[in-house]
Amino acid sequence: MLKKMLCVLLCVLMLPVALAEESTAPVLSMEELLNWAEGFIARAKASQPLNDPALTFTPDGYEYIYDFATLYGDTPEMSADTVISAIVVTSEEENGPRNVNVGNAMAVVIDAYYSENANLLGTKESAVLYTADMLPEAAHWAQVLRDGQRVQTIQYAVHEQHATGGEGYTDAGILYTMADNRVNAIRVYGLNSRIDLDIVNQVMYNLMVAALENNYAQVPLSYDGLTLEKFRAEDLVFSGMDFVNLTPEEAIALFGEALSDTWVEDGDAGYMRVQTYPDFELVYLFNKARTEGRVYMLAIHGDGMEGPRAVRLGDDFADIYNRFRNGEGEYQEDGSEMMYGVENEGSYGKATYGYDASATALYSFLLEDGRRVTLQMFFDIMECSQILLFID
């Protein structure tokens, strides 16, 4: 059973996840969108919908549900004169624009289009992929919306004047809805929408301002673990803090007053100071006089806090596995895998797998002063449930 589960896991780990380099692909055009939509519209007009469109009117129009896609039009009954405004594809069997399909990894989407931001530099909430301001003729842009490392949508927009015959600008594009950093729906929208130049200018200005923010990036992922870096000192600067040198006062400055801030006697060693926040806990070791101390541990118990390489509660095992070096060792009969290095010697990474879909991932290295840093993560049903980072 364990071997079978491991085989399934390894198949997931080998899926292509590496982010693309700077892309030379062309920006999305209105002509391209219309040409792609034409085939779906023709199929819809030659078929009967699975629902009664007259009963479902949305902001995009009447909803026509087919087994190949859902279309939105301006009449309650499909005819040769029906104008289609949007198309949504949720089937993996259908080809999306540029052959990006439902089920494809985020990297496939990014690689298919022009991009000036391969590392998705931005904020925890968004990243601008590009802005192409060629006004008054046209403007194009693309943006990622995300919750930390969890990409929610990737949008490519087209504002072209010539496509409207001079009556304003198009307000069309493609919206890829993502789940677990994979496409789960493709929405081509605005096939007949028009907006004024003032609106286009404001959109472009807002995006160019947003593009100046670059304090957060997508962590590199790869199915080839030998191309990834080992857990190292650079990883200890995260979530706005330098963990190795963190003091209780700096934590308060960064995260505000703790829910509780207590001193606990630690036998002959001195004292522990424990700061408890809603999503994490910080522990420091102090001498008996409470005058000298150092950070000892970070325990993350809520998904509002990211650890090294943006690991977070709720992340699945494969996603975290593909952020750290792996592939040097082999799976052992005892349910363990040395991802790199030799256990308890220098820098190493080790995973253990349970029969109940539980797992642990442990990464460790030595600081220059000889202290050992260890990052340990626990998984239930292959979902991260606890994160510990400590310095011995």
Image (tube, helix red, strand yellow):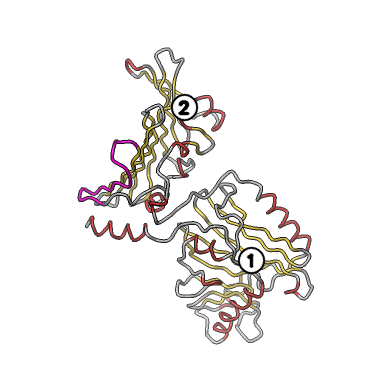
- Marks 1 and 2, Cα distance to the nearest angstrom? 52 Å
Q: Amino acid at mark 1?
A: Val
42 lies above or below 309: below
Residue 343, above or below 167: above
Q: Is residue 162 left or right of residue 217?
A: right
The magenta segment is: 331-346
- Determine whether, in the image, residue 300 is placed left or right of residue 147: left
Q: Residue pushed farthest left?
A: 333
Query: Contact (CB < 8 A) between labels 1 and 2?
Result: no
Quick one: quadrant of the C terminus? top left
Q: Which mark is residue 27?
A: 1
Q: Position of residue 328 (x, y in %)?
A: 32, 49
Name of the residue lying farthest toward the top: 289
The amino acid sitting under disc 2 is Ser
Select label 1 or label 2 by which is in front.
Answer: 1
Looking at the image, which is closer to me, 177 or 330? 330
| Label 1 element class | loop
Q: In the structure shown, which secondary structural element does the residue marked by tag 2 occupy?
A: strand
Query: Which badge, 1 or 2, is on the more N-terminal residue?
Result: 1
Q: Is residue 197 shown in magenta?
A: no
Tell me what residue is drawn at x 65 percent, y 82 percent. 82
Foreground of the two, 349 or 262: 349
Q: State the mark number for residue 67.
A: none
The residue wearing badge 2 is 260
The crowding category of the residue bearing disc 1, from other C-alpha atoms within 10 Å (few below 14, some 14 to 19, many at least 20), is some
